[in-house]
Amino acid sequence: MKSINSEAISGKTVIVRADFDVPVKDGVVEDSTRIEKTIPTLKLLLEKGNKLFIISHLGRPEGKDPAFSLKLTLPKLKELFAREVAFQEDLEKKAEGEVVLLENLRFWKAEEANDDLFAKKLASFGEVFVFDCFSVAHRSHASVVGIPKQLPSYAGIEISHEVEELSKIFKNPEHPLIAIIGGAKLETKLPAITNLAKVADKVLVGGKLMFEVENVELPQNVLVASDNVDGKDIGEESIETFAKEINSAKMIVWNGPMGVFEEEKYAVGTKKVAELVANSESYSLVGGGDTISALKEINMIEKINFVSVGGGAMLEFLEAKRLPGLEALGYYE
């Protein structure tokens, strides 16, 4: 997988598939983490004398909806980037400027349909493609797998970092390695649980999953929460059991809350696990929106060694699936 860290890209117009899918409330960006993680790639490309054509998505709009316009991210992008950014609303004519941001890709149905003509049209706005959006690496969308068929393509700094860090779990991990999987949707989490059980000393399972796995045959090193609070959080006994495993760890990977984290009464398990992971002396990797929110709420996100913004892509990577976005960059060759 070729990366912009090692490749000489200069004097080009570079299309950057960025991750600006951030929470917006009342027209203002609430959490700019994903934008912040893209800035190093943008700055490096500009330092090498390139022009930038930035493409991204925001939310899941049904057609063109002003509430999901990437124009809402412009003030925050300009603040973090400290540069002027032109905005382009359609695909008719390229906007003038050293840095251009295109409107929300998902305003065009052809994006998620992976339409070839749409991918070619996007590719026509640049000479080189840089993919730096790990959160959609598991999607076969035009901006993920279509553009690389048209242009020389490279991995950005953030996605290279994501792959490097998550690969540590499977390539010479430190032991004891403890994996923690929570949340719901057994069909999406079970493959990750099973695959992690092959390399981890213990896989701890909480959240709604503790009920969903009741009739599933699991590997012997998978430890499912044994008690609960109103069926909405792991109980004290499970917290104690999990604490012993987490405190013994040399490496921890965590994705998914231990309960209905949105309700204070049922956030105890998640917050306690967050404290244990953050205060552990082990190497820690975490991902998933609620997991990150829990760590931020107790002001311990800075204690985590690596925070993945991948979400679903992180889970599929953990279950050893081939991610289309990485495949398009030649990662598996």
Image (cartoon, grey):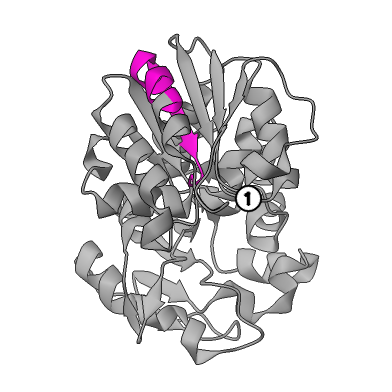
User: What span is in magenta?
Assistant: 241-258
- Quadrant for residue 141, please give it: bottom right
Residue denoted by label 1: 184
Secondary structure state at the residue bearing disc 1:
loop
Instruction: Please count the marks in the image.
Output: 1
Mark 1 is on which residue type?
A: Ala
State the residue at coordinates (48%, 21%).
Answer: 178
Quadrant assignment for the C terminus? top right
The percent coordinates of residue 292 (x first, y second) are 38, 49
Nearer the observer, 270 or 86: 270
Residue 118 drawn above or below residue 144: below
The percent coordinates of residue 294 (x first, y second) are 35, 50
The percent coordinates of residue 259 (x first, y second) are 50, 50
- Quadrant for residue 35, please give it: bottom left
Q: Is residue 194 left or right of residue 6?
A: right
Tell me if residue 270 can be seen: yes
Nearer the observer, 262 or 49: 262
State the residue at coordinates (39%, 16%).
Answer: 249
Residue 112 drawn above or below residue 246: below
State the residue at coordinates (43%, 10%).
Answer: 174
Q: Residues within 10 Å of mark 1 (few under 14, many from 20)?
A: many
Quadrant assignment for the N terminus? top right
State the residue at coordinates (39%, 19%).
Answer: 244
Tell me if residue 47 can be seen: no
Residue 43 drawn above or below residue 245: below
The percent coordinates of residue 79 (x first, y second) are 20, 70
289 drawn magenta: no
